[in-house]
Image (tube, helix red, strand yellow):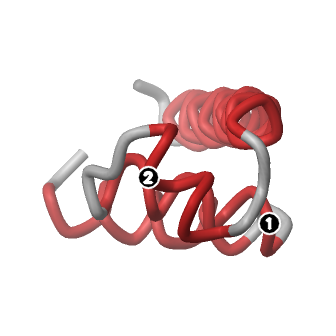
Amino acid sequence: MSGKSAEEAFNRNMKKLSEKEREVIEKLYLEGKTIYAASKELKISRSTVRYRRHKAIEHLKREILNDIGNLGIMLSLRGW
């Protein structure tokens, strides 16, 4: 997968998250905030940040596995 298609897949899957999950992922991983800093900025508890992070990562895993499965189907249809 090229860098551009990986970025497109990431952006597509991020859009599938709930707004609350997405904002936690953005704070923690795109902005590099700590759980403590993210909780203060979002005005939620640290346990809520951890819970939303966990749920978001589970959603992203499912979507990525789905993308991989679809890629395998496409490749098998092409005879690879």
* Residue sticking out furthest to the left: 3
Q: Residue at x 55, y 69 (%)?
A: 41
Foreground tag (2 vs 1): 2
Please state, as top left, top right, bottom left or bottom right, where the N terminus lies in the image.
top left
Amino acid at circle 1? Lys
Depth check: 63 or 43 in front? 43
- The disc label shown at residue 20, or none: 1
Residue 67 seen in the figure:
yes
Residue 66 drawn at (x, y percent): 73, 36
How many labels, in total? 2
Residue 72 drawn at (x, y percent): 57, 28
Depth check: 26 or 12 in front? 26
Q: Residue at x 50, y 35 (%)?
A: 75
Amino acid at circle 2? Ala
Residue 3 drawn at (x, y percent): 14, 58
Residue 30 drawn at (x, y percent): 31, 60
Q: Is residue 59 left or right of residue 13?
A: right
Depth check: 2 or 37 in front? 37
Q: Residue at x 62, y 42 (%)?
A: 67
From this view, report whether residue 18 is shown above or below residue 59.
Answer: below
From this view, report whether residue 26 is shown above or below residue 64.
Answer: below
Q: Is residue 4 left or right of residue 71?
A: left
Secondary structure, mark 1, is helix
- The disc label shown at residue 54, or none: none
User: Hey, which quadrant is residue 34 in on the image?
Assistant: top left
Residue indicated by mark 2: 37
Please state, as top left, top right, bottom left or bottom right, where the C terminus lies in the image.
top left
Residue 73 seen in the figure:
no
Secondary structure, mark 2, is helix
Mark closest to the chain's N terminus, 2 or 1 = 1
